Amino acid sequence: MKIISLRIILFFSLVVLFGTSTISLSYSIEVSDDPRIVIIDDEGNGCEQIGKWNKNSRTCLLTQDIEKYLWIEGSNLTLDGNEHHVQLNKENYMPKLTIDNKQVHTSTIYVLGNNIIIKNIRIEGFPIKFNQSMKDDSYGINCRQTEKIQITDSEFFDHKVGIICNNAEIKNNKFFSNEYAIKSLNTKIINNEFHDNYISIELYKNNIVEKNIIKNSNYIGIKISDIGNTITKNLIQHSGSPFRCVSCNGNTIFYNNFLDNQNEPSAGYDYVAGGNYWNTFDSKSEGCTIIPSSNFCQTSLVFGSFKDPSPWRIQDGWLYDIDVPDDIQTTTQNSDGKSIDFSVSATGPDGSVKVTCSPSSNSIFPIGKTQVICSTPIGVVSSFFVTVLDANVIAQKQQQQSFESGLIGFLKLSSLGLGIFLVILIFRTRKRKNLRIKQNANTRRIEKI
């Protein structure tokens, strides 16, 4: 087993009658020998203290709740919490550590290896009722210096930071009452639930945040601190502010539902989003200009330096797709119009959905151009046009065009014939004139003789 040497900085406060003194005490320990830390290495050693090691699947399966720190030193392995809890007791609590001359927060699970899966585990920090300073130093999972980490189907409570991670996938987890639920860089954050956190997610560079439910964030739903982030198809509700950016430029924010949040988003500098739903801007009375054939407000939503030029009128509208035919054009000899048959279909997040059109298929469409608007039960719409032309009018136009074409042809032909006649006439006239001149010259010569 690899031995990790650490220097632990302990802080003690001595409160005396006339003031407070602070004493720092440093000492070194060998982590491998510290009873407060369980280390799992490449061979699964250490797993026997808390569960069962499966050599074939390289999985450590917990068989008990844990009150110690858990460090994963090995790579290419799985920690399956088996629905057990990890929560430090006060006796095992350690303050910040100094590793390689850098002070770091202690983390309940500290990941040092690569290609790690952590799943089915409940990690609890320190509620304020224990000690506020202990909560301030409580990190759930730290995987900042690793690659290819997956954290799934787990729960995080009462941490300073629930997960701080780079190069990871965080999926299908739940976060409750953390100061920061997640801090991440180059990470996929997908299909998680966040409840009653102060800031649910803080993003640095190149993260994907998709299909998450974020509710009751006391301050900010998503804090965006760098560029290259994509935020889409999330629900952010009943939060202080749905998101705030140092500068939103260089990030993409679209297809999100923002419901009943207390404050406006903050973009830092001028920023244009790509179409989100805001339940405070989906009716005429709220400033949304509506036309029946569009899913979007025809007016932009503006909050200071933030602008959404095409806000959706329908929550989750982007999850629905209506397949309508291309524009239809036909003819009829009936002045009342023509029955038109067409087929439409629609899909939603759960498969096929009902779709109705007005006018409906097989309706009598009058002569002229008619817009057909098709809609789903939640109000998502799509449209196409049916144009019915009067066959009698078309025939008359064709006859008129034929007559005009023939006349033009005749005139062209006549013009050509007239031109040829004139050329011949001019040629013959010149020839006769030349002949007369020649005859007159001959006559004068004879007379002289």
Image: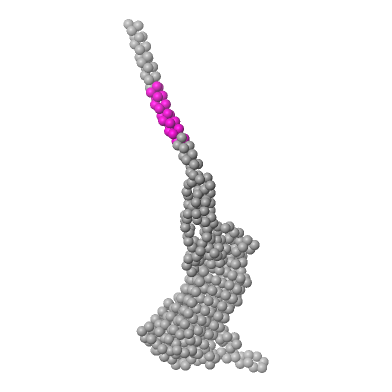
Query: 63 and 34: which one is in front?
Result: 63
**Residue 270 on image: x %, y %:** 57, 64
122 versus 266 height, above or below: below
Task: Write the start and end of the magenta stretch as one range.
Answer: 404-426
The image shows residue 235, relative to residue 87, as above or below, that is above
Q: Is residue 235 magenta?
A: no
The residue positioned 61% from the left and 71% from the top of the image is 261
Residue in the picture at 37% in, 19% down: 431
Q: Main secondary structure of the magenta part?
A: helix
Number of numbered discs on residues? 0
Quadrant where the image shows the N terminus: bottom left
Rendered view: 319 above or below 417: below
Question: Does residue 116 appear left or right of residue 296 in this picture?
Answer: left
Say which quarter of the image contains residue 435: top left
Q: Is residue 447 left or right of residue 241?
A: left
Q: In front: 39, or 338?
A: 338
> Does residue 422 belong to the magenta stretch?
yes
In the rendered image, residue 132, in percent from the top left (x then y), is placed at 59, 86
Q: Residue at x 56, y 67 (%)?
A: 315
Q: Position of residue 297 (x, y in %)?
A: 58, 60
Quarter of the image where the C terminus is located: top left
**Can you see residue 408?**
no
Q: Quadrant of residue 177?
A: bottom right
Task: State the image coordinates of residue 397 (x, y, percent, origin top left).
Answer: 48, 39
Left or right of residue 107, residue 217 in this image: right
Residue displayed at 42% across by 77% down: 148
Q: Residue furthest right?
A: 18
Looking at the image, can residue 55 be seen?
Answer: yes
Q: How is the image coloured?
A: one colour
Q: Nearer the viewer, residue 371 or 46?
A: 371
